[in-house]
Image (spheres, coloured by chain):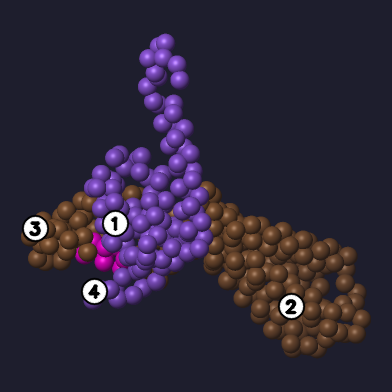
């Protein structure tokens, strides 16, 4: 029997094409389904059917790919959403802690930041409030991913939106802060090269969180819709 | 039994066939069919995503192992899964006895209990 005519291979290939999400998880899903269909085919063969008939019945019992793929897509979205929420809950507070440690350590000058404008100080408050809100929301969303009653797609969408909003607010205010205090930011970099690490960490966190959020949004794709 | 009627109970049914030991996907499907005497007519494909859902909710733990020369994902009931199963059994027995009490044909008129 050629592969093209094998209904099991065709069914598995269709499922594989339908799913959106992390490659590792998709591979595992496909492997498990392929094994299951092989088991079902074997069972029909043991009952006396020829291979082609056995494979056809195994595929018929399995049901339409679209229905199964949609259920799997819920799980892919939920898994990616949980990851996004966890990253948000850990990375953003860690980044804020790193910056405040840097300011309070005296590395930035014995008296801490001097001559900061009122606007910059307001932005620092805004960042801290946004971080606390985002982290608390993210933790609540992680908890929701363990509840069977919560819609996995809604929780995942909320995680992606919260993460993107936090990135926009914290990242945006950081850019404004550094542009407003441009001279100071430059002096800080020159006087304390260690601060370059903090800037690099900030960029990394923004990139990681945005990437994770957009992966979650992609995993929310509905089977049957063009991607 | 109609697939729609089964769907809402699928999680509980899966937990229940895993109570006496770990099984892989197809063995779970076989156990569901055997225990129902073949009356459980649902697309077998829906069992696999349900296993993932139960794993995400912490009720099952899944791991790959080689069984009978084939690599298989084997599922084990977790402690949370056992609790969920017990809760679902209690809910079901309450629900079914209430529905049964209402559905039972009324006694003939004049008959007292």
Callout in the foreground (1, 4):
1
| Residue underneath mark 1 | B31
Q: Is residue B94 left or right of residue A28?
A: right
Q: Is residue A83 above or below residue B109?
A: below
Tell me the quarter of the image containing the C terminus of chain B. Answer: top left
Callout in the foreground (4, 2):
4
Q: Are both tags, 3 and 2, on one chain? A: yes
Q: Are marks 4 and 2 in contact (CB under 8 Å)?
A: no
Callout in the foreground (3, 2):
3
Instruction: Report the magenta stretch's main SS.
Output: helix
Callout in the foreground (1, 3):
1
- Give percent across and percent down for residue A87: 60, 68
| Residue underneath mark 3 | A49
Callout in the foreground (1, 2):
1
Colour assignment, chain B: purple
Whether the magenta-drawn stretch holds residue A36 is answered as: yes
Q: Are marks 1 and 4 in contact (CB under 8 Å)?
A: no
Q: Residues within 10 Å of mark 1 (few under 14, many from 20)?
A: some
Colour assignment, chain A: brown
- The chain containing the residue under callout 2 comes to A
Local secondary structure at mark 2: helix
Instruction: Tell me the CA gap for discs 4 and 2.
Output: 52 Å
Q: Which mark is first along the chain, 2 or 3?
A: 3
Q: Residues within 10 Å of mark 3 (few under 14, many from 20)?
A: some
Instruction: Tell me the CA gap for discs 3 and 2.
Output: 66 Å
Whether the magenta-drawn stretch holds residue A224 is answered as: no
Q: Is residue A143 left or right of residue B70?
A: right
- Give percent across and percent down for residue A104: 84, 79
The segment highlighted magenta reads A31-38
Q: Is residue B53 visible?
A: yes
């Amino acid at each position: 029997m050629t592969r093209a005519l094998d209904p099991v291979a065709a069914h598995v290939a269709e499922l594989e094409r339908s799913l959106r999400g992390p490659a590792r998880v998709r591979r595992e899903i496909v492997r498990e389904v392929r094994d299951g269909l092989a088991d079902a085919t074997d069972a029909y063969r043991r009952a006396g059917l020829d291979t082609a008939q056995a494979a056809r019945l195994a595929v018929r019992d399995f049901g339409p790919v679209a229905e199964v793929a949609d259920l799997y897509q819920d799980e892919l979205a939920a898994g990616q959403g949980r990851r996004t929420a966890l990253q948000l809950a850990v990375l953003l507070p860690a980044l804020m802690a790193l910056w405040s440690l840097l300011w309070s350590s005296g590395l930035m000058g014995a008296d801490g930041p001097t001559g900061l404008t009122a606007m910059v100080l307001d932005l620092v408050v805004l960042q801290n409030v946004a971080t606390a809100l985002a982290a608390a929301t993210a933790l609540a969303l992680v908890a929701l991913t363990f509840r069977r009653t919560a819609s996995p797609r809604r929780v995942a969408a909320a995680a992606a939106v919260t993460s993107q909003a936090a990135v926009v607010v914290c990242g945006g205010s950081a850019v404004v802060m550094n542009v407003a205090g441009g001279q100071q930011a430059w002096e800080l970099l020159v006087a304390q090269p260690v601060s370059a690490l903090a800037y690099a960490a900030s960029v990394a966190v923004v990139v990681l969180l945005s990437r994770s959020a957009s992966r979650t949004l992609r995993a929310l794709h509905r089977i049957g819709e063009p991607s | 039994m109609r697939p729609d009627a089964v769907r809402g109970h699928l999680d509980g049914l899966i937990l229940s066939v895993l109570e006496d030991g770990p099984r892989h996907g197809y063995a779970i499907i076989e156990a569901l069919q055997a225990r129902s005497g073949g009356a459980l007519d649902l697309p077998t494909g829906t069992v696999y995503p349900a296993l993932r859902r139960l794993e995400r909710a912490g009720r099952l733990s899944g791991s790959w192992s080689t069984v009978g020369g084939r690599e298989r994902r084997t599922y084990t009931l977790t402690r949370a899964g056992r609790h969920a199963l017990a809760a679902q059994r209690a809910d079901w027995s309450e629900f079914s006895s209430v529905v049964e009490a209402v559905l039972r044909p009324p006694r003939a008129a004049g008959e007292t209990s």
